Amino acid sequence: MLEGAFNRKLKRALETHPAMKDCLVLKHNDATTGGIPDFSISNGYHTIWIEVKMQDNNLSKLQMYTLKKLRFAGQVVYASKNGKQALIFPSSGWEFDFEGLVEEIVRRCVNV
């Protein structure tokens, strides 16, 4: 699975999750937004930023700089090549299947 396809699948899953009805999910990655995480999720005054990387892809120096500035608001999802397993950092210490990843992101957005 390509990174763009995984991003679209994840964004769609988050937007349609019942617990996310009051959240705003915005896609940010295009040719003019280098270093900005792929998308953000806002719930009232709380926003997290998500950068997605497929297995064997690394963060650029600009992405690392941006995520460092965002501190704990910046999350990185590392997905397997087939898009069926993922890790999320800052780490929860677990590897997730796709549905589990969606639930973990929802937990981080809604339970603030």
Image (spheres, rainbow, N blue to C red):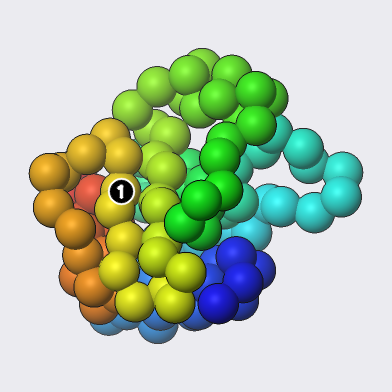
| Residue 80 found in image quarter | bottom left
* Relative vertical location of residue 72 with respect to residue 40 in this rendering, above or below: above
| Residue 96 found in image quarter | bottom left
Which of the two residues, 51 or 16, is positioned nearer the viewer here?
A: 51
Q: Residue 49: percent from the left, percent from the top?
A: 48, 43
* Relative vertical location of residue 103 with respect to residue 49 in this rendering, above or below: below
Which of the two residues, 112 or 101, is positioned nearer the viewer here?
A: 101
- Say how many tags the image has: 1
Which of the two residues, 102 or 52, is positioned nearer the viewer here?
A: 52
Q: Secondary structure at mark 1?
A: strand
* Relative vertical location of residue 8 with respect to residue 22 in this rendering, above or below: below
- Please rate how many residues cluster around mark 1, counting C-alpha atoms within 10 Å: few if below 14, some from 14 to 19, many from 20: many
| Residue 106 found in image quarter | bottom left
Q: Amino acid at mark 1?
A: Ile
Give the residue number, with chain letter if any, for mark 1: 88
Is residue 41 something one can see in this rendering? no
Instruction: Write the residue at 66% across / 37% down.
Output: 36
Instruction: Write the residue at 57% across / 36% down.
Output: 59
In the image, is 55 to the left or to the right of 46?
right
In the image, is 53 to the left or to the right of 101?
right
Q: Report the quarter where the N terminus lies.
A: bottom right
Q: Residue 51: percent from the left, percent from the top?
A: 52, 47
Is residue 32 something one can see in this rendering? yes
In the image, is 89 to the left or to the right of 42?
left
Q: Residue 12: percent from the left, percent from the top?
A: 49, 79
Q: Residue 95: percent from the left, percent from the top?
A: 19, 58
Instruction: Write the residue at 42% across / 74% down.
Output: 83
Instruction: Write the residue at 50% across / 27% down.
Output: 67
Q: Report the quarter where the C terminus lies.
A: top left
In the image, is 111 to the left or to the right of 105?
left
